[in-house]
Image (tube, rainbow, N blue to C red):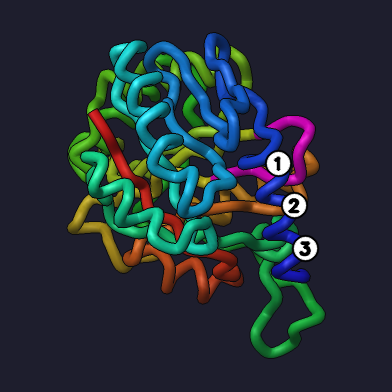
Amino acid sequence: MNHDEVLSLYERRFRHEPAPEMPGAVVERAGAVVRQSGPAPCWNGILWSDLDERTADAAIAEQVRHYAELGTEFEWKLYGHDRPADLDRRLLAAGFTAEPPETLMVAETARIAAPAAPAAPAAPAAPVAEPEGVRLVPVTGMDGVELMADVHERVFGASRVRIRERLAVQLAEGSVVAVLALAGGVPVSAARMDLHPGTEFASLWGGGTAPEWRGRGVYRALVAYRAREALARGYRYLQVDASAESRPILTRLGFAALATTTPYTHG
């Protein structure tokens, strides 16, 4: 995998010329900024910008006005290579809050779905097995959505209302693969994969695991499960915005770090 070529492809598909993520969302170029706006549970925010020291402050102020008129909070997704170099400080000065930084990581789907055996790199190994005592179950309806929302609320502190609304929309339009890890019928982890038709990428999200089940391979099993689903659908690459906790695991699985990204939130 050529890292520069894949990063360029990612930038084009998801930053320069992105498709709206769900019905009701609008992606538009506003001057030197590409943004998405829409009603909940749509993500609102800035996907890409082409700014310099002369234009940055005015562009930031314009985006703050735009989303204030919509009455919604939003996020400026800042990548480490974005310009100007002090754009992060300008966002903070404009009232944004920096969230924990993430790492854009990408892997070839086929490699993750059937990783190479350590002793014979050319020979595919068996898919990652489910950890002992854990069963992976696809989410196909609202009962599963409620269980996923419960897991994410417990693990991440995320709003169960927003998660439930988003998953319900995505399941209805067939743009997501969602999966639960159950231990004795109790959900201990959950994850989803957003599908991006017309692109080479599927995106992995979630994977939060209950503390008592961490370190047992649940996260790895959820990644492998989604990789197999992506491969079956013809997606060449898997993409993750990795937290500091998940980055080492993903690196061991074969994902490569292509860039850093920090969410700056406002509102």
Q: Amino acid at mark 2?
A: Leu
Where's the N terminus, which quadrant?
Answer: bottom right
Main SS, magenta residues? loop
Which residue carries the number 1 mark?
Answer: 13
Mark 2–mark 3 distance (CA, rounded to whole Å): 6 Å
Task: Tell whether 172 sits left or right of 216.
Answer: right
Say if mark 1 contacts mark 2, CB within 8 Å: yes
Q: Is residue 201 magenta?
A: yes
Span shown in magenta: 196-203
Q: Secondary structure at mark 3?
A: helix
Does residue 170 appear in the picture of this structure? Answer: yes
Which residue carries the number 3 mark?
Answer: 5
Q: Residues within 10 Å of mark 1 (few under 14, many from 20)?
A: some
Q: Amino acid at mark 1?
A: Arg
- In front here: 185 or 31? 31
Which residue carries the number 2 mark?
Answer: 9
Does residue 143 appear in the picture of this structure? Answer: no
Q: Amino acid at mark 3?
A: Glu
